[in-house]
Image (spheres, helix red, strand yellow):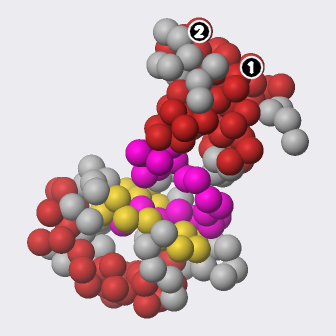
């Protein structure tokens, strides 16, 4: 499985726009994830080769950023804030309600492949704590109570 030509061209465009291969590493990973939902080992190696960097160097970027997924994720990704503001405003109870409702822990995906739950240091919603980001558009939801989890997952929030 080779890097699709359109994806290759997008990455090369990023290299030209961002000031070189090293500057474009994160954008290249983001482009792969946008196209495929996550960054597999094979794709990481292909992108590293295209950029002229080592796989270890590119992987260090991929694993540093929590929003670059190095394993398959569910159709809907839930990024739950575990920052101080969310924690102080009931984040622990919200986290437990999500894990109980989904039957998974952080970094896991439901058996049906529908949801992945990922903790995030901050989602930028301190004024709406406790908060989370959900879906492909990373919609900010908050403040969210444990009682609102069912409505969230049923698409009513």
125 is within the stretch colored magenta:
no
Residue 1 picture location, percent across and down: 87, 42
Residue at position x 79%, y 26% in the image: 6
Q: Tell me where residue 126 sits by quadrant.
A: bottom left
- Residue 72, placed above or below residue 94: above
- Percent position of residue 121, x then y: 28, 56
Give yes or no for residue 63 being in the magenta stretch. yes
Q: Please state if 152 lies on the left or on the right of 121 as rendered.
A: right
Seen in the picture, residue 7 relative to 83 is either above or below; the reply is above
Q: Give how far across and how far down residue 44 sits, in percent.
A: 66, 39
Please tell me the numbered disc located at residue 116: none
Q: Which residue is mark 2?
A: 16
Determine the secondary structure under disc 2. helix
> Is 50 placed left or right of 29 in the picture?
right
Query: Is 6 placed above or below 98 here?
Result: above
Q: Which residues are magenta?
A: 62-80
Please state, as top left, top right, bottom left or bottom right, where the C terminus lies in the image: bottom left
List the single residue furthest toward the left. Answer: 88
Q: Which residue is mark 1?
A: 9
On the image, the x and y values in percent for residue 96 come to: 34, 85
Lateral position of residue 151 relative to residue 50, left or right: left
Residue 148, visible in the rendered structure: yes
As measured in the structure, the alpha-carbon distance from the residue carrying label 2 to the one carrying label 1 is: 11 Å
The quarter of the picture where residue 131 lies is bottom left
In this rendering, is residue 115 above or below 49?
Answer: below
- Comparing 55 with 33, the one in front is 55
Q: Secondary structure at mark 1?
A: helix
Residue at 74% x, 29% y: name it: 7
């Amino acid at each position: 499985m080779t890097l699709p030509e359109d994806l290759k061209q997008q990455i090369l465009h990023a290299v030209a726009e961002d000031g070189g291969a090293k500057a474009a590493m994160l954008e290249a990973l983001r482009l792969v994830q946008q196209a495929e939902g996550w960054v597999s080992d094979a794709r990481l190696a292909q992108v590293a080769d295209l950029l002229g960097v080592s796989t270890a160097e590119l992987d260090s970027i991929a694993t540093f950023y929590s929003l670059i997924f190095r394993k398959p994720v569910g159709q809907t990704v839930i990024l739950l804030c575990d920052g101080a503001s969310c924690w102080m405003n009931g984040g622990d109870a919200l986290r437990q309600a999500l894990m109980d409702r989904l039957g998974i822990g952080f970094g896991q995906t439901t058996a049906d492949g529908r949801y992945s739950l990922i903790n995030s240091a901050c989602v930028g919603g301190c004024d709406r704590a406790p908060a989370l980001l959900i879906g492909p558009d990373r919609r900010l939801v908050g403040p969210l109570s444990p009682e609102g989890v069912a409505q969230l997952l049923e698409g009513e929030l």
